[in-house]
Amino acid sequence: MSNNLMNNNFSEITFDRKSVRIYDESYKISHEEMLEMIQEATLAPSSVNMQPWRFVVVESEAEKAKLKPLIRFNTRQNDTSSAMILIFGDMECYERGEEIYDQAVAEGGMPPEVRDQQLEAIIPYYKNFTKEKMNDVVKIDSSLAAMQLMLVARAHGYETNPIGGFEEDQLAEAFGLDKERYVPVMIVSIGKAKETGYSSVRLAAEKITEFK
């Protein structure tokens, strides 16, 4: 459990979350706490535990200036947040499969023979995915981590805003990543709120649900 939690009330964290676009410009989140929050976010589930998410934390003025022309109408978040967290999906995430499953064995969560059986089946399966299928898998899994990150941030006393309006074809290369391997999923701004955010309506559950 984190030592930096400001709030551990599930209802407040989850149901009072709002998208905040203006932050206290003077407040910077330490690298230690940022890594702590990302670690907690990666407790989110992923298909066969391949953990395809990758994070780039844009916090310096120079790097934020590089990001600014790529985020369309989301410049207030970029200008005032402690950081803009770029979340990518790794199209070759299976390359870390052995490392992940070795760690599971080392921590007593999996017998070696199960690791070997799983890797023998999973790695070729992933390698045979079409580009479109892999894109779907890594974006779904990385979106789960993004949502968890936003809730974790609230527990730490911060607010966030998920951002989908950016130049997808330029984001990876702008920050030194291979654009064929790393597909942009979302940008999450994070910081100490300077505004409360706005409530928004949701359709009633019975309008969007069918029981069969």
Image: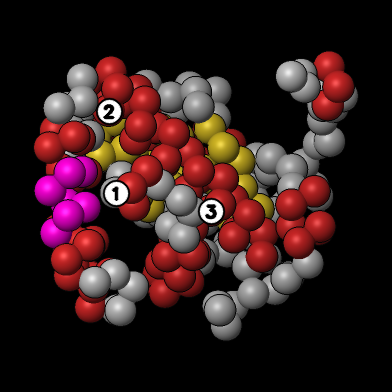
Task: Check if residue 145 falls in the magenta segment.
Answer: no
Circle 3 packing at 10 Å, graded few (<14), some (14-19), many (20+), is many
> Compared with residue 64, is residue 35 higher up or lower down, i.e. above or below?
below
Q: Quadrant of residue 193?
A: bottom right
- For label 1, the SS is loop
- For label 3, the SS is helix
Q: Earlier in the sequence, mark 1 or mark 3?
A: 1
Measure how far apart labels 2 and 1 are at the Cα level: 12 Å
Residue 42 or residue 172, whichever sits in front: 42
Q: Earlier in the sequence, mark 2 or mark 3?
A: 2
> Compared with residue 43, is residue 81 higher up or lower down, i.e. above or below?
above
Q: Amino acid at mark 2?
A: Met
Residue 139 appears in view: yes
Task: Left or right? Give the position of 208 relative to 24.
Answer: right
Report the residue that reaches farthest toward the bottom: 3
Q: From the top left corner, tell me how far across and down residue 133 is, in percent.
A: 29, 22
Q: Residue at x 20, y 20 (%)?
A: 130
| Range drawn in magenta | 116-122
Circle 2 packing at 10 Å, graded few (<14), some (14-19), many (20+), is some
Task: Left or right? Give the position of 7 relative to 137.
Answer: right
Q: Residue at x 23, y 78 (%)?
A: 106
Residue 107 or residue 35, whichever sits in front: 107
Query: Which numbered tag is attached to residue 50?
Result: 1
Q: Residue at x 22, y 21 (%)?
A: 131
Q: Amino acid at mark 1?
A: Met
> Compared with residue 108, is residue 94 higher up or lower down, i.e. above or below?
above
Query: Which numbered tag is attached to residue 134?
Result: 2
